Amino acid sequence: RWWQQRVQAGLRAEYSGPTEEGHDFFQTRKTGGTGVLLDFYASFKPQPNATLWLNIENLQNKSYDNNASIDSIFSPILDRGNGRGRTVSMGLNVAF
């Protein structure tokens, strides 16, 4: 935080290690982990009622598995690397 907290920036790290997944009804297999995913965020407050912001998710653009999407026995085969790639979003919030 700088300039009386008018400028803020940060980095968030999320770690995903190895796991076991169901390969079929009778077997499981170990999968490699994604490692660390990094997200960057920043904001600037030029006026008391206005904020400019920037978010960059998956800063390194890593391919990873989104485990929340597993919904069937075929998911371990079909959902390889389905996690969201680098995503940049920015905006302006104004309160009045």
Image (spheres, rainbow, N blue to C red):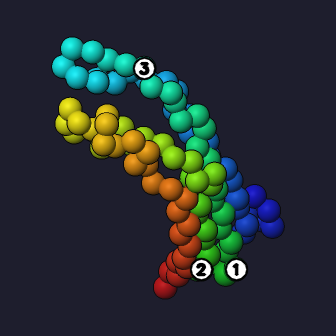
Q: Within 10 angstroms of label 2, few (less than 14), some, or many (20 or more) residues?
A: some
Q: Earlier in the sequence, mark 1 or mark 3?
A: 3
Between tags 1 and 3, which lies in front? 3
Give residue 4's position: percent from left, percent from top: 77, 65
* Towards the viewer: 1 or 16: 16
User: Which residue matches tag 2?
Assistant: 50
Q: Position of residue 29 (x, y in %)?
A: 37, 19
- Distance from the alpha carbon under mark 1 to that under mark 3: 50 Å
Callout 3: SS = strand
Q: Quadrant of the N terminus?
A: bottom right
Cα distance between the residues tagged 2 and 3:
48 Å
Q: Amino acid at mark 2?
A: Ala
Residue named by callout 3? 30
Q: Circles 2 and 1: CB distance less than 8 Å? A: yes
Q: Indicate which disc residue 46 carries.
A: 1
Of labels 2 and 3, the one closer to you: 3
Type of residue at label 1? Answer: Pro
Q: Residues within 10 Å of mark 3 (few under 14, many from 20)?
A: few
Q: Residue at x 48, y 43 (%)?
A: 64
